[in-house]
Amino acid sequence: DAGVIQSPRHEVTEMGQEVTLRCKPISGHDYLFWYRQTMMRGLELLIYFNNNVPIDDSGMPEDRFSAKMPNASFSTLKIQPSEPRDSAVYFCASSLAGDRDAEAFFGQGTRLTVV
Amino acid sequence: GNSVTQMEGPVTLSEEAFLTINCTYTATGYPSLFWYVQYPGEGLQLLLKATKADDKGSNKGFEATYRKETTSFHLEKGSVQVSDSAVYFCALSDRRAGSYQLTFGKGTKLSVIP
């Protein structure tokens, strides 16, 4: 398996624009997580899904952020409108429900810069 | 709620020095504990894990022991190499208590100099 695949790797956008980050989890994994990493706050969980259903979105910073998982092999994180303070590295991770001690597998991240 | 506290870096060591990165946790249930490593420009990779008290996780010369009495999971390596330079994250999950996500510490940046 190719692992968790995220795209794009880098995104530079202007304030006010819509940004869409994409993630393909490992085939067969039924949990998918979106994390944000910044120097100030470290790694923060934004939202996670189980079997394509959002379970906990309490980490989503505000209504400008939304996430979807239309099927088991694809998820998006959208920011609309984007702001400079959204600049961060966004990670997607997936894991397997059946193994209660399972590790999460991370993608390489999307580095977002909002200017 | 669950939380992880780890020593903040950066930590700079000479090659072949001994490494300890402290990690303590707070959890409502009986968590599994993890160390992840992030090399520059990459995502996080699992380094080792332990799932019950007194378990020792080990990988690539790194070790950590699950200490329930002190709620700790300190990372150690006897002799570091330049290639160990990275950011290390301590984390927990507590699926048995219904918490499926990983809760991370803030990370410790390690630099190993020749």
Image: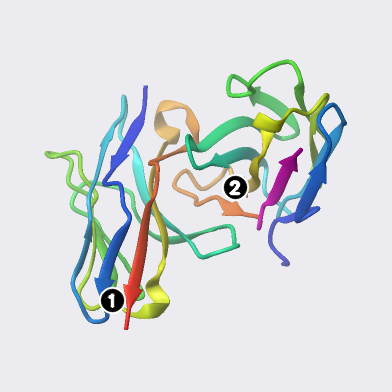
Q: Which mark is residue A96?
A: 2
Direction from residue A71 to residue B12 in the image, left or right: left
Q: Residues within 10 Å of mark 1 (few under 14, many from 20)?
A: many
Q: Are marks 2 and 1 in contact (CB under 8 Å)?
A: no
Residue B4, quarter of picture? top left
Does residue A71 appear in the picture of this structure? no
Looking at this view, name the residue that lies furthest to the left: B69
* Extent of the magenta region: A108-115
Asked which secondary structure carries label 1, the reply is loop
Residue A20 position in % (x across, y down)? 84, 38
Residue B68 position in % (x across, y down)? 18, 40
Which residue shows up at 32% across the image and 84% down it?
B114
Does residue A43 appear in the picture of this structure? yes
Residue named by callout 1: B80
Looking at the rendered structure, the kind of residue marked 2 is Leu
Q: Quick check: is B88 in the magenta stretch?
A: no
Asked which secondary structure carries label 2, the reply is loop
Residue B18, quarter of picture? bottom left
